[in-house]
Image (spheres, coloured by chain):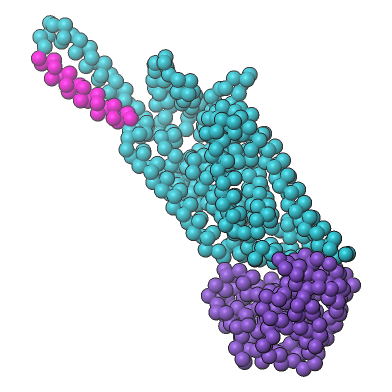
Amino acid sequence: MLEVNHLTIKTRQPILHDFSYQFMPGQFYQIAAENGLGKTSFLRAITNLIPIAAGRIRLEGKPYTQNKDKVFFFESNDWLNPNLNSLDYLKFIKNMWHSQVNLADELAFLGVQDYAKVPIKKYSLGMRQKLLVAMYFVSDAEYYLMDEITNGLDEVSRKQLYDRLAQEVSHKNKCIIMTSHYSSELRMINAHRLVLEQQMMREV
Amino acid sequence: MMSYFGFQFKKITKHNLTIIASCILIIISFGVLFLNANQIDSGESIKGQIQGNIVIQKNNIAQDKQALKKYSPTGEGYRQTKIALKQTKKQLQANQALIKHINKGQWGPVYKEKIKESNKMKTTGLSERNLDFVSGIKKRYQYLVKHPLPYESDAAVTGLQFWSDLNGTYWPILFTLVIIFILTYLYTDAYKNGLDITTVLPINVMRKQLSNSLVGLAISCLLYLLLSLLVFTGASLIFGTGNLQYPAIIHHLVNGRQTVAVAPLATLIPQILILQFLEFIFLVLFIQLLAKLLHNQLPTLLLAVLLVVGIGLATTVIEPLAQIAQWLPNTYLNAINVVSGVVAYNINNYHINFASGVGTLLIGSLVLFSLICLLERTRTHHFKEVEVL
């Protein structure tokens, strides 16, 4: 369980005030907000990328730093090194997260294997985003923190992604927290929808 | 830890910057070899000088023979010219004999002749630096008489001489710049929008720190060894390997007085490599610290170049810096000139030597490592503090 207690986040301006919530395994959470209201900052705060102003975050009873291998968060494809290729990233993640998944299967999902050895600098936005998706599944972490992951994906890939996420939640008991824009269509049954506005986050 | 090491290593080996920078360095290095080789061909070698003298002496003999025809055989002019002609012929024979010795690879007589020339040289009125220069060359000939080796000091073209020449001239700046570029790229790649994205990796802070340092060090050492091997092999294939026992001119203090001496290159190489290795450790930690402070590639690069290369060069021209140069890690960028005492001699600071280099670089690296750990600790502490609020 990812437990957030009285969380307050301030960057240049206040982002979130006194938010408490429990993100449970085997559940899918969508955090929706307008651009610039702090969806990404919330995920960054959970993963210690930015300091929090107040509150406490516990991952299965421990601070994030002691349970990093249970969470996978790769904010955007801007984080990818353009000189490396998909295979470099996927092998690295598999080793770092001590994942048991079959790399070939994950490369085949969304078709990353077609360009697995091509440097990332030659990828289109969609190809980079598919790699990002593959990285989550290769990590096989218990918690996926996904920031607007469907950006740049075509319709077919989006459907494949949602189907796979549904399987990950129901069969592998994963906890998936996905941020998205208000207008984004969510195709998950039994998803928890949280809305972030005016520095408050609440489930709707 | 190995996965992280390998991943970081790939970032450098797969980056075009590494390949381009290394290629530029190789091109410049072989450009220097080409220029050095031209220097020999243009008559600036011992053989070239003797051959030049032979040409002049032959001309003089021809002129003297013509002059003899003009003079009366009983006149004073005839007698003087006859003596001069005899002397020139003798010198010509001596020079022709030297050329034969050189062609046969018998350098002993050549060195003895050069020592005689040095002894005859008028040194009155020469500056102290010029006197040291003459003394150094004379001592080199004296060493070579005792240890007969082919002459390699005309221009650095043999494998070993060329490698040591590059290490004493171009590489301390050029190679350092290449390493700064590569390390800056490696250590600032972890920062996106000012955030350390490696924070999300399931790896202990100390292990990550250690891996980062080891990757930087491995890349610096590998690149240095590869380039050294390449220039050595390249020069050796064309001009021969050279001899490890060949003397290098060194400057050191004897009873508190600056003295010029010679030492075989073989005795200097271990110290050169140790200093170079320590300098790499220092650079790796220094650029890591800058990256951690600035979180951005360009400011890190700019500051690293200014502080490492800029201050390194400044010590040779700014008097107050020269006086404390032994405490500046930048002074030891030119390891070969530190070990041979050339840096100490040039800036007149005899505290600069191999031992001071080891001490300064070790202390400097330790200070940098402590600062990096302190920064990490401050960051972690900052996060922990908020957590319990």
Q: Please state, as top left, top right, bottom left or bottom right, where the N terminus of chain B lies in the image.
A: bottom right
Q: Residue at (20%, 21%) from the top-left corner?
A: B61
Residue A52 is covered by the magenta coloring: no
Q: Nearer the viewer, residue A114 or B327?
A: B327
Q: Nearer the viewer, residue A99 or B154?
A: A99
Name the residue furthest front: A198
Q: Nearer the viewer, residue B172 or B368?
A: B368
User: Start and end of the magenta stretch?
Assistant: B49-70
Q: Residue at (45%, 23%) from the top-left corner?
A: B130
Q: Residue at (28%, 30%) from the top-left corner?
A: B52
Residue B63 visible to an observer of this rendering: yes
- Give the color of chain B as drawn: cyan
Residue B340 visible to an observer of this rendering: no
Question: What secondary structure is the magenta-colored segment mainly?
Answer: helix
- Location of residue B355 (image quadrant): top right
Q: Residue at (76%, 90%) from the top-left corner?
A: A166
- Location of residue B100 (image quadrant): top left
